Structures are given as structure tokens and as C-alpha cells.
Image: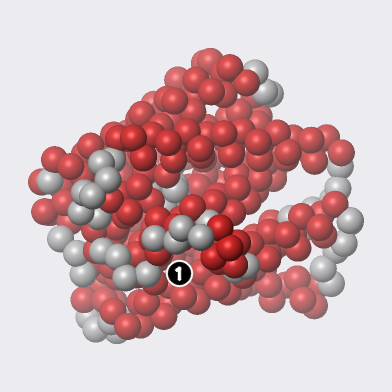
Amino acid sequence: MELAWITVEKIIEMFIIIAVGAVIFKLGIIDRDANKKMSGLLLKVVAPAMILMSYQMEFRMELLQGLMMTGLLSLVTSLIAIVLSSVLIRRGHPNEEVERMAVVYSNCGFIGIPLIQGLLGTEGVFFMTAYLTVFNMLIWSHGLMLMCGVSSIGTVLKNLVQPATVAIILGLLFFVLHIEIPEVAANPLSFIGNMNTPLAMLVAGGNLADSNLVAALKRPRTYRISFLKLIAIPLAALAALVLAGAGQSVSLTVLVAVSCPTGAMGTMFAMQYGKDSNYAAELFAVTTILSMITMPVVILVGGGFL
């Protein structure tokens, strides 16, 4: 029950920041243009700093092995989500790209990290960075293909050269090679990375204020997409994790990440690449509301099998 309470608490915290973003948008302190620029700052500066600093910890071989296993299972469960989204969300449907992004990519950073810290401590947080690594690699390849319609492998590889993916590579190298960033540089990078959650939530709040949440709650399709994201995919992932037979720490870390609601990154990408960011923000908000019920249930059920 403690984990269930942590889940609800973190979601409430998120909505407080989202509400602030919505208020400042309504008051005219920020507008659509400012919101789009803030999303660019988040994707290209703040998130890469957070990723890089997440790998700044003492090297141990068992940690590396657990990290690799978490990364493998993260890839498997993400591919399950991608396949299910492709099969169950019909091609040619309006906003199919936004819906698939919403189903595949979760809010594993803000909700996932605090949750796994409450359950497994610092070891769980470290393993969560492996999921975040796979998440970022996929969102900057598969995610870009969804949003931009990219079909050329060469173009995909070119698009992978992004600040976030560079940060992943550098972070892994620093961890394996025992390279510690000097404090005079580490502290500023940590300060910048710590802006990730509040900035993402403020941008999402601005988008939410510019959308129609009441209409979204009345739309039956919203609940279909929410069911796929919050119930179907986590249960499919749980089945794969049980079959894999990995350690409980690794398996629970992946399950927590998969069970998180739709990520704010879907809204950021929709803004950056000309898709319906209002709809993306609506799915983000509705799945986050519903996750207050689904996440504690899925994680508690999973804990009994893993």
C-alpha cells in the first residue's frame, strides 16, 4: 500500500505544476510561441543534462550487469508496445501518430523514478536510467519516424544525432570508464537537469489550457487509448517479464516504467513537428488522471508475480 500512496502523491504533485502552467497560459504570461520555445529548450538542453548526470555514480560490475538486463527488457517491452500500437490503432485514422506516441512512450522520468526509489531505493533509480536510455533512443528514432514520416534509414540515423542521444553515449562512457565530471561543471549541469520535470509540466499545462479537457473526457476514443496505455500494454509487459525470469529489482523497475501514464514528450514532439499538440496534451492529462487508479493496481499485481 505504501507504493500505491507514493504513486498517487507523485501524480498530485505533477498536476499542481500542470495547473500552474495552465494558469500562466490563461493569464497571458506565456503564449503558444513561448510554449513551443520552452519545449525546444527542454528537448535540446535540459533533458540531455539530466540524462548525462544520471550516469555519474560509482562503477560496480553487478550494477552494469543489472543495467544491461534492464536495458534488454526495456527494449523488449517497448517493442511489444510498438507492435500493439501498430496493430490496434488503425492506419489512416486522424491523429494516429499522436495516439501511437501516447501509447508507446510513458512518463517514466517524473513518475517512474520517484516510484522506484520508494520501492527499491537508489539501486532502482540506477536501473531506471537503462529504461530511460532505451526510451530516448527509441523516441529519437521510432518517435521521429512517427511524427515526421521518415522512411529512409540514413535519415533516421542522422536524426539520432540529437543532444539527448549524445548525452546517453557520453553518460555510458563516463560510467564504464570511471570518468567523474568535475564539480565545477557537474553542479551547473545538475541544476539544469533538475529543471526537466517542472519545465515539462509547465509546457504541458500551457498546452492543456489551450485544449478542451472536458471534450476529451467525453470522447469514447480517449478511453480506448487510455486502456491500451494503462492496462493492455502493462499486462503484456508483465507477461514478458514473468517469462524472462529476471531478478525482482530489474523486473519491477521495468514494470513501473511501462505502467506510467502517457509522457509529456509526446506533447513536446507534437508541438515541434506540427501535429495536434492539443490532442496530445489531452491524452497526457486523461491518462495521468486515470493512472491514479491503474498504476497502483498494476504494480501491486505485478509484485505478486515477479
- Where residue 72 appears, as percent x and y from the top left, is 65, 36
Occupied quadrant, residue 161: bottom right
Q: Hey, what amino acid is under mark 1? A: Leu
Could you say whether the residue bearing mark 1 is in a helix, strand or loop? helix
Q: Percent x, y for residue 134?
A: 60, 47
Give the residue at x 62% y 21%.
244
**Residue 124 percent coordinates (x, y):** 65, 39
- In the rendered structure, the answer to whether residue 225 lies left or right of residue 37 reads left
Mark 1, residue position: 199
What colour scheme was applied to this rendering of the protein?
A: secondary structure
Q: Quadrant of the N terminus?
A: top left
How packed mark 1 is, by other alpha carbons closer than 10 Å (few <14, some 14-19, many 20 or more), is: many
The residue under the point 29% across, 59% down is: 281
* Residue 264 in view, yes or no: no
Number of labels in the image equals 1
Q: Is residue 38 visible?
A: yes
- Residue 251 lies, with reference to residue 290, above or below; the image says above
Which one is nearer the viewer's eye here, 141 or 271? 141
Q: Quadrant of residue 153?
A: bottom right
Determine which quarter of the picture holds residue 159.
bottom right
